Image: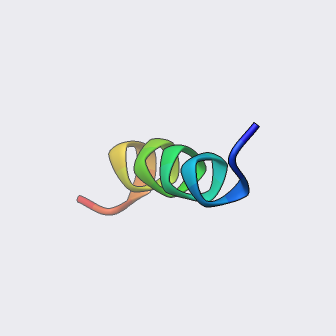
Amino acid sequence: MNFKWLVSFVSAEYCARGCS
């Protein structure tokens, strides 16, 4: 797995839940 992809995915999930 690409670590950079994983970081992007986790960041997107976190932002979707708590960035608003």
> Which residue is most to the front?
2
Q: Residue at x 69, y 47 (%)?
A: 2
Q: Position of residue 19 (x, y in %)?
A: 33, 62
User: In which quarter of the view is residue 3 placed?
Assistant: bottom right
Residue 18, percent from left and from top: 42, 55
Does 11 sit left or right of 16 as displayed?
A: right
The image shows a total of numbered marks equal to: 0
Q: Quadrant of the N terminus?
A: top right
Colouring scheme, one of rainbow, by chain, secondary structure, one colour: rainbow
18, 11: nearer the viewer = 11
Q: Quadrant of the C terminus?
A: bottom left
| Left or right of 11 on screen, residue 18 | left
Q: From the viewer's perspective, is residue 18 above or below residue 6?
A: below
Q: Nearer the viewer, residue 17 or 11?
A: 11
Q: Residue at x 41, y 49 (%)?
A: 12
Identified at 51% across, 44% down, the residue is 9
Q: Which residue is farthest left?
A: 20
Q: Furthest-top residue in view?
A: 1
The answer to whether residue 17 is above or below residue 11 is above
Residue plotted at (64% across, 47% down): 6
In this rendering, is residue 20 above or below 17?
Answer: below
